[in-house]
Amino acid sequence: MAEQINDLLNGNVAWVNNTLKHSPDFFEVLSNGQKPQFLWIGCADSRVPATEITNALPGSIFVQRNIANMVIHTDSNLLSVVNYAVKVLKVKHIIVCGHYGCGGVQAAMSNDKFGFLDNWLMHIKDVYRTHEDELDSITDEPTRFDRFVELNIQEQVGNLAKVSWIQDEWDKGEFPHIHGWVYSLKDGLIKDLGISLNSNDGLEKVYRYKK
C-alpha cells in the first residue's frame, strides 16, 4: 500500500520535471492566478479527467465532479462552485459532461439497493420517471442505458438554467453558455449532444426569474 502512495508522489516529481523541461516558467505563470474560460461539471468516475480528455492545460478548466454529473439545487458544494465560476471567474462556458457506461446512471436504472447512495440516486431516478415513456420503449438494454445517460445530461443542463444567478448573468449579456456533452470510454471521444443554452427562454414560465 505504501508503494502505491509513493508511486503518486514519484509521479508528481516526474511530471514537474517534464513540465519544466518544456516550459521553464510554467509554474510561475500558473501561481499568479487562474482565468479559466470553462466550468466543467462532470462525473467523479476516475476514467473521465476533464483536462486530460480535452488536452487542456492546468488553469484552463474549473472543475466540479460528483456521481453522475448531477446538478441538484440543494447541493451547496456544487452551487458554491457554480457561483464562484460565474460571478468571480466569469467563465464563458459551462459544460455538463457525462459518460456512457456511467455506474451511477446504471444503478439508478435498476431496482437494487445501494444503501446511503440511494439518496443520491433518487435524483437520477427522477430523470428516468420524467422520460419513462421514451426509455421504456427502448427494448435493447444497452441502448436504453446510453439514452438514459444522454437524457440525464439534458436534464442537468436544464437544471443549471434554472439557477437565479446564471439568469442574472444572461440579463447582462450572452454568457455563460451551457453545453451538454457525453464522453465515450470505448473510443475516448466526446460527443456534443447539441444542447446549448444562454437564456431562460426555453424554460417553463415558473422557472424564469424577473429581470
Image: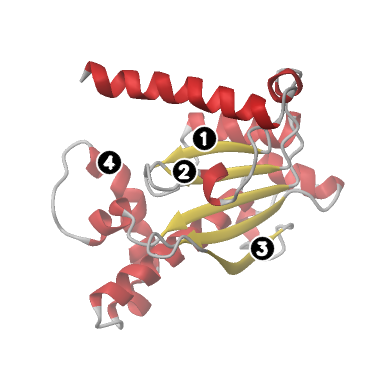
Q: CA distance from mark 1 to mark 4?
A: 17 Å
Residue on which disc 2 sits: 72
Q: Nearer the viewer, residue 200 or 44?
A: 44
Q: CA distance from mark 2 to mark 4?
A: 12 Å
Which element carries disc 2, helix, strand or loop? loop
Residue 97 sits above or below residue 64 on the image: below
Q: What mark, if any, has residue 196 been given in the picture?
A: 3
* Mark in the foreground, 2 or 3: 3
Asked if the residue at tag 3 contacts the one at tag 2, i.e. Cβ–Cβ closer than 8 Å, the answer is no
Identity of the residue drawn at 33% across and 18% down: 6
* Mark in the foreground, 3 or 4: 3
Question: In the picture, residue 102 is in which quadrant?
Answer: bottom left
Residue type indicated by callout 1: Leu
Which element carries disc 4, helix, strand or loop? helix
Asked if the residue at tag 1 contacts the one at tag 2, i.e. Cβ–Cβ closer than 8 Å, the answer is yes
Which x, y percent locates residue 88?
Answer: 74, 28
Asked if the residue at tag 4 contacts the one at tag 1, i.e. Cβ–Cβ closer than 8 Å, the answer is no
Residue type indicated by callout 3: Ser
Question: In the picture, residue 115 is in which quadrant?
Answer: top left
Residue on which disc 4 sits: 119
Question: In the picture, residue 33 is in which quadrant?
Answer: top right
Residue type indicated by callout 4: Asn
Which element carries disc 3, helix, strand or loop? strand
Of the residues under marks 1 and 3, which one precedes in the sequence? 1
Which element carries disc 1, helix, strand or loop? helix
* Mark in the foreground, 2 or 1: 1
Q: What mark, if any, has residue 78 been given in the picture?
A: 1
Residue at the far right in the pictured view: 172
Which x, y percent locates residue 30?
Answer: 71, 24
* Mark in the foreground, 1 or 4: 1
